[in-house]
Amino acid sequence: MKFTITSILLSLTLISNAQIPDWTKSTCDGTEYNMRTELNRGNAVLMDFSAMWCTPCNIIAPETEQTWQNFDSGNNHLMVFGFLYQDNSFNISDCHDQQTWSLAHGITYPVFIDIEDVLFEYADAYSTNGSVGFPWLLLFLPGNSEHPEEYLAYKGHDINEVNQILQDVWTPQLGINEITYEEKTLIKIVDQLGRNTSYKPNTALIYVYSDGSTKKVFTME
């Protein structure tokens, strides 16, 4: 039976914030990132708040990874950060959960656990009714001539809308004509030992594409 729970609402108190809240988080491998540092470097920042039990979160996770890859994994001034809230049993996520999540969706961008502090602070700042539904995407852009200070460009649940803003607003700001989306097709599926196989649920697989890229996939049924 497939896992079909979609989302819940977090009841939070709405607090007005004039400045983008800062945060410092470390991934499970010990790499540290800071929100203010990324914005000061001129990077756009996409924050993806997700939970393992959330079906829409599982659906958009590979698409968020593709957005990351389209910007050459951060080299074109976009940083993507995953904030994994809970596991399938609604427990606070741990490093094992993060590894399972990243493997299942082929995620290469940084993913953090133990993120309640950031989640609640940003919900206080950017929730309009005191509630947040997962997945929750926040896109921040550095300042420019029209916006002297960094600003929230998008909040919502649609990665396609995020991509549209990146295409129409962020790439012109960078002096890039457009984001290059390469057409690619699935060539083969292999297991963890490199042996050719077919699709299997509840099994870690590697999808190999025509452009040479690979994606690790794990589908729970």
Image: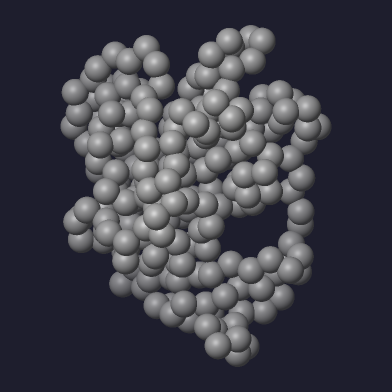
Residue name at image x 55 percent, y 26 percent: 40
Residue 162 spot, x, y in % from top left: 56, 35
Q: Is residue 78 above or below residue 20?
A: below
Identified at 43% across, 70% down, the residue is: 219
Whole-percent x and y of residue 161? 56, 34
Residue at the right extreme, as displayed: 177
Q: Is residue 27 visible?
A: yes
Q: Which quarter of the rendering shows the C terminus?
A: bottom left
At x 53%, y 28%, the residue is 39
* Drawn side of residue 216 relative to residue 94, left or right: right
Give whichever of 92, 25 is nearer the camera: 25
Please give left or right for residue 143 compared with residue 35 in the image: right
Q: Residue at x 38, y 48 (%)?
A: 26
Q: Nearer the viewer, residue 109 or 87?
A: 109
From the image, which quarter does the N terminus lie in? bottom left
Q: How many marks?
A: 0
Comparing 212 with 59, the one in front is 212
Looking at the rendering, which quadrant does residue 48 occupy? top left
Task: Give the image quarter of residue 117.
Answer: top left
Q: Position of residue 145 (x, y in %)?
A: 66, 10
The reply to whether residue 5 is in sight is no
In the depicted structure, whether residue 5 falls above or below residue 186: above
Vertical placement of residue 116 versus 212, above or below? above
By what rule are the colours in the image chosen?
one colour
Residue 159 percent across, percent down from the top left: 53, 41
Q: Say whether residue 125 is left or right of residue 182.
A: left
